[in-house]
Image: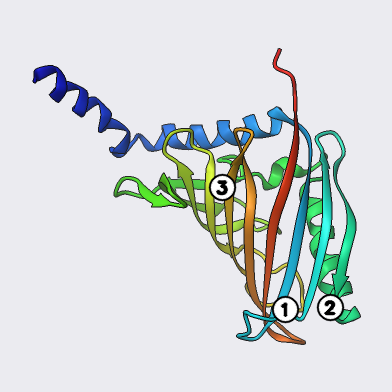
Amino acid sequence: MLFLLAWLGTAALPAQQPDASSVIRGVDAAVRARFEGIAEYTVLEHYAIFRGGSASKPMAEMTVKDHYRKNFGKSYVIVSQSGPEIIKKMAFGSLLDSEKRINDPATRETTWLTSANYEMKLKPGGPERIGGRQCFAVTITPRQSVANLIVGTIWVDAKDDSIVEIRGMLSKNPSVWTGPTQITRQYARVSGFAMAAHARAESNSFLFGKIVVTVDYQDYHLQLRPEN
């Protein structure tokens, strides 16, 4: 009986509130491990743009094959697209250009979700269940007001500190044509790494009013770097 009680007490430890600094160090390590561990990958990305409150019929869609290479960044091949030309040019073109900039080898580390770019604070209250996983919530505030950084909260896996979900606002409007942009992004484990599974962005466009953009990521193929 004493052994059973001792075992139960040990099993409950992961659910307790951890040291904040250890979680933040874990997030930094998980982001770095993902970068170092993946040499390249391909994925199909399906973009859909919805206008106003409509969530059933997109006004424009695009599917692209994304090819990431660690030393070169990202490139895209458009598989299919539909919708007005102005939407495809202004929205889809802007989205793909933004992704290329974020993954530019010369500057990509400045947008990583790490303590170098964000002030991070562990939320009290212990783990929460997000996407079927026990997670700790960490608030993130950019250390600088630059494009593609987020003010909000990330949820990280309580076991390995990998990112499970992000919710927040872009710290800087991506375009003069849009207002504040609210985003969410969910991640899934692929070959042991956190990879984007679904994303959603909502903003108000000067030309089109309320706009919602969703991205679904499918059919990942990862090439991992060999371990030394």
Left or right: 183 in relation to 176:
left
Question: Is the residue 91 above or below the residue 193 in the image?
Answer: below
Give the spatial CA distance, label 1 vs label 3: 34 Å
| SS at circle 2 | helix
Left or right: 74 in relation to 139:
right
Q: Residue at the left extreme?
A: 1
Give the spatial CA distance, label 3 vs label 2: 33 Å
Q: Position of residue 82 (x, y in %)?
A: 85, 75
Query: Which quarter shows the N terminus?
Result: top left
The crowd level at tag 3 (other Cα within 10 Å; few <14, some 14-19, many 20+) is: many
Disc 3 marks which amino acid?
Tyr
Which residue is label 2 attached to? 87
Left or right: 70 in relation to 203:
right
Question: Is the residue 215 above or below the residue 213 in the image?
Answer: above
Which residue is label 3 attached to? 118
Q: Position of residue 128 (x, y in %)?
A: 36, 50
What residue do we see at 67% from left, 65% from top? 172
Of the residues tagged 3 and 2, which is closer to the observer?
Answer: 2
User: In which quadrant of the rendered view does residue 48 lie?
Assistant: bottom right
Disc 2 marks which amino acid?
Ile
Of the residues tagged 1 and 2, which is closer to the observer?
Answer: 1
Q: Position of residue 114 (x, y in %)?
A: 58, 41
Disc 1 marks which amino acid?
Pro
Left or right: 150 in relation to 85:
left
Q: Is residue 59 or residue 205 the one in the foreground?
A: 59
User: In which quadrant of the rendered view does residue 54 lie?
Assistant: bottom right
Q: Is residue 191 or residue 195 the one in the foreground?
A: 191
Q: Identify the mark at residue 58; answer none if there is no mark.
A: 1
User: In which quadrant of the rendered view does residue 55 lie?
Assistant: bottom right
